[in-house]
Amino acid sequence: MIEPDLVLRGGRVIDPESGRDEVADVAVAGGRVVDIANGLGPAPVDLDVAGHVVTAGFIDLHSHVNSIPGLRLQALDGVTTALELESGVTPVNAAYEQAGTEGRPVNYGFATSWALARMEAVAGVQLDGRLTTFLANIASPAWQRAAAPAQIRAMLGRLSADLADGAIGIGVLVGYAPGTDPAEYVQVAALAAEARAPTFTHARDLIEFVPGAAIDGAEEIVRAAAETGAQMHYCHLNSTSQRHVDRVLELVARAQAAGSRVSTEAYPYGSGMTGIGAAFLAPERLPERGLTPSSLTYAPTGERLASEERLRELRATDPGGLVIIRLLDEDDPADRGLLLRSLEFPGAMVASDAMPLTWTGPGAEPTAWPLRPDAVTHPRTAGTFCRSLRILAGPDGPLGLTDTLRRCSLLPARLLQDRVPAMSRKGRLRPGSDADIVVFDPATVSDQATYAASTRPSTGIVHVVVNGTFVVRDARIVDGALPGQPVRA
């Protein structure tokens, strides 16, 4: 056997794939797990983790965080791989090059972006491989207008080029351009099917919200899966379905039973977050979702919006400024039940929709840690995975620990591994798997972030190892540790 450089000794080892659940030692060498057994010999780094769970690191399919401090916050929630797939970026080469030059504490990867490709083809926006370009243009009607055939060919060409450059899949923010012809969406899905790449969709409005919509957002996703054979991943089903979760889940279940490749994800919070310039946050459209301006909290100032006039002002002056949107009441038993059902749904994955940090004071150093108190975000950035463990696998939770862990690691890895074969080494804890490992205390693991204290790290995450290197050790960020590697098709 290869001599290990790290042994995690005496923990409760859970492999989400095989169901292994036993006390054992885990040996790591060269960035891989090399052995799991009792009584392994010593190693240069030899840690007693008795009483703690040792398992595969969490894979976040839906993270808009692309900064070192924000990803450290996710690492403290057990995340070892954070992927920008729903929005995506383009050109992906630029995004991978930037991340590789700066370094990342966790593994990273990108889908190509239908929305940005559309901004380029329809509105002439210059692209730079950054999400900020999308946020800066989010409210512009220019990119949301009907596309001519030549423009559609141009955007499909951009998506194809990114797929050839290793994009993980195609992110489709169709909910931000609700007037788009449904036929265009099917063309994007057909391109994905041809490339054997998954798509990641922020759904268009449900028919309950906009009775006159060209197509129901949930029906659109399952129809595209049936017509093209593409893998269609339904992003944050909880937030786009709101109180229609049960209807949407029933539709997805029927599609899955018929053989369509539709998968789902959810996060365990009742409020969403996005740029204030989003089409569905226009003052005249808020009543569609039962919202008012006071349902929105503007992150840069922390203000709860008092009027339509203030909302219009901010949409004009800071369209990409992030807002918290109160959609479901987490304290209401009926709404909480909807959230749980979106998370419990067979095969549903946990994904955070983690958001970039907003600095309410003077700009900070891009790698500054610990975070200053004027850094704000959505609490899901800091707490999604530990909150999911608490509510799904806790004493009153509906799922067991192994099933919950599968939704945090194995299922995301399986979704991607046909397109990205390297993912077959992630989401598992077995000899030969990548040494992306989280060690947590099951008695204390919990989210701590709130809407008032959104960057408070989770508790109970003791160690996080990425490619064999500690990113979190003894519940603290390891200064300078940037072992993240690109996840690329």
Image (cartoon, rainbow, N blue to C red):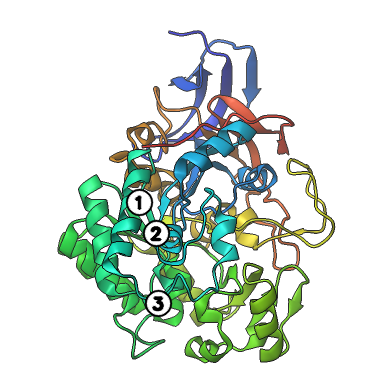
**Mark 1 = which residue?**
159
Location of residue 310 (image quadrant): bottom right
**Mark 3 = which residue?**
178
Q: Who's the residue at 24% across and 71% down the image?
A: 183
How would you rate the neighbour count of disc 2 (Cα within 10 Å): few for under 14, some for 14-19, many for 20 or more? many
- Please give the label number shown on residue 188: none
Residue 28 in view in this figure: yes
**Do the residues under discs 3 and 1 have CB atoms within 8 angstroms?**
no
Is residue 456 depicted above or below 24 in this figure? below
2 or 1: tag closer to the N-terminus: 2
3 or 1: tag closer to the N-terminus: 1
**Label 3 is placed on what type of residue?**
Pro
Is residue 145 depicted above or below 121 in this figure? below
**Do the residues under discs 2 and 1 have CB atoms within 8 angstroms?**
yes
Label 3 sits on a secondary structure element that is loop
Is 220 on the left or on the right of 470, as rendered?
A: left
Front residue (pair 407, 166): 166
Measure the alpha-carbon separation of dots 3 and 2: 13 Å
Q: Who's the residue at 59% across and 69% down the image?
A: 275
Task: Provide residue 404's location: percent of width, then percent of height.
Answer: 45, 52
Is residue 358 depicted above or below 306 in this figure? above
Label 1 sits on a secondary structure element that is helix
Q: On the rendered image, what quadrant is the C terminus found in?
A: top left
**Label 2 is placed on what type of residue?**
Trp
Front residue (pair 95, 296): 95
Is residue 226 depicted above or below 85 in this figure? below
Residue 235 in view in this figure: no
Q: On the rendered image, what quadrant is the N terminus found in?
A: top left
Measure the alpha-carbon separation of dots 2 and 1: 7 Å
**Mark 2 = which residue?**
114
Task: Provide residue 232's location: percent of width, then percent of height.
Answer: 30, 59
